[in-house]
Each structure stands twice: as C-alpha cells, then as structure tokens.
Image (cartoon, rainbow, N blue to C red):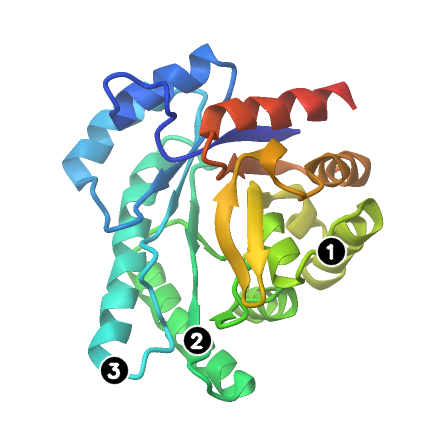
Amino acid sequence: MLNFGTAGIPLSTKPRTTKNAFYTLRKMDLNALELAFVHGVNIKEKGAKELVEHARKIVVSAHAPYYINLNAKEKEKIERSINHIIKTAEIIHIFNRYSDVNRNVVFHPGYYLKMDKKEVYRIILKNIKRILDYLKVNRINVMLRPETTGRVTQFGDLDETLSLSQELGILPCIDFAHIYARSMGKINDYNSFYNILEKVENTLGKEGIYDMHIHISGIEYGRGGEKNHLPLKESKFNYRALLKALKDYGVKGTVICESPRLEYDALILKREYQDL
C-alpha cells in the first residue's frame, strides 16, 4: 500500500494553516503531509502537540530546511545545519508518539564544494552520526532520510544515498524526479525505475522497499541537473512508468508530490496508481 500526499499545505486550503491542511487532504482522499520547513522550523513544540489531534489518518513527515550543508567549510554552518535537522526531528517525534508511521525527517545532506567526493562522503557520514547519537541519547524516535538530490553540485546521487543509509542504519528518501534530472533525462523509463528499486532492495533489504519515502514531481533540468519543479503534465518526466514500476515491485510507504500543483497532481498520481 502507498500513501499519497503533498509537500506542504495544499493550495486549496483556506485559511492556509497546517491544521486546515489535514482537513483539506482528508476531504480530497489524500492521506500524507510532509511539513515543509523550507526556511526554518516554523512549528513549535506546543503547536505540534495541538496539531496532533487534527492529523488523524494522515501520515506526517517533515522536510528539514533547504539551506543545510553538512559539508560546509565553516564550522558554524555545520553546527546550524545539525541543529536544523535536530529541531525538525523534535517536531516529528511529537507526531510519532501517536503513530509510529509519523517518523520521517527528510533532508538534503550538502554540497561537494569542488572537494573529493570520497572525502565529502566521510564528512557527511561523520556529521549524521553526530545527529543520530543526539537523537538516541534524547530518545527522539525518528527516521532520518537523506534525499537523492537533483543537481550535480549536490551530494546525494543514488549510490551515495544508498551507501550512506546502509552504513548508518537509516533509510533514504528517493526523489525520482531528482534522479531523472541529475541523469539529464536518461533515467526515465520502466526498466530504469525498476532497476532503481532492485538496487534499493539489494542494498537495504526488504525494509528499503516496504518502508519507502518517495518524492515525485514534474521537473526541468539543464547541464547542471535540476532547474525547477513543474506540474506533472508539463514535464517529460515519465511518472506513469514510475507508478507501474512501484506497483509491480510491491513498494509500500509514502509518495509525496512536490509539483507546483501539489494536491491536484497528488490526486493524479494516486488515481493513476489505483487504476493500474
């Protein structure tokens, strides 16, 4: 079974509050919301506790702020990045107390900064270990999910993300639109998507397939990879082939739509998946 939902508050939500977002999603027969802490964690502990009762039957995850770089040259930037992920985890932990599926914390690990990729991997691994140690000591029960990234300057191709997840005992966020953009459009057919799922299972076992967190959107790319997200039907990204691969492989978990059309494209994904 796959849950389908949106990255952030659905466009049709009025007033546009997180509480109302849960009602909008249920009304539209969607059941997942990824809290979009794009510019900072904007929900406090008290607010999260008040939101929990409104989140019934909605799978809640969160995306940590975009300006994270666990490979920053400045120590203070690394410390801020670590703190952003921890703050995101603390909010998701509140939702997780009431449902163990509400545990995913998605983040972009960082940038290469023209450094040796193996050295960048080592630095990012070390800094995620620091976060995991803090979460363990403070009994914050979440799943950190490094995301496959869309730009060639960003750490996070598929192999790096899977290797990092395996070594740390965590799970990835597989953003198929990012993988497509990073490949300059080469990874865009049923066999390519199916092969990715096989690689996930071979690296992480059945848990990697039965507890997936997936991002999908239309996307535009250039020589550097991802440029910007697009509505599904305005992009050449072959989301239909991806949905068939997910169905045939028996994937379970959550699909988050990051299209500019949010809930409308999330519904397209859900309905086309159900029709397969």
**Which of these two is toward me, 153 or 79?**
153
Q: Residue at x 52, y 88 (%)?
A: 116
Secondary structure, mark 3, is loop
Is the C-beta separation of discs 3 and 1 under 8 Å? no
- What separation in Å lies between label 3 and label 1 (alpha carbons)? 35 Å
User: Which residue is disc 1 drawn over?
Assistant: 187
Q: Which mark is residue 251?
A: none
The quadrant holding residue 133 is bottom left
Mark 1: few, some, or many residues within 10 Å (few <14, many ≥20)?
some
Q: Where's the C terminus, which quadrant?
A: top right
Circle 3 sits on which residue? 74
Q: Are marks 2 and 3 in contact (CB under 8 Å)?
A: no
Nearer the camera: disc 3 or disc 1:
1
* Residue depicted at x 48% and y 14%: 28
Kindly identify the amino acid type of the residue bearing the numbered disc 3: Glu
Crowd rating for badge 3 (residues with CA inside 10 Å; few <14, some 14–19, many 20+): few
> Residue 124: which disc?
2
Where residue 148 sits, quadrant-wise, is bottom right
Between the residue at mark 2 and the residue at mark 1, the CA separation in whole angstroms equals 26 Å
The x and y percentages for residue 236 are 67, 43
Q: Earlier in the sequence, mark 2 or mark 1?
A: 2
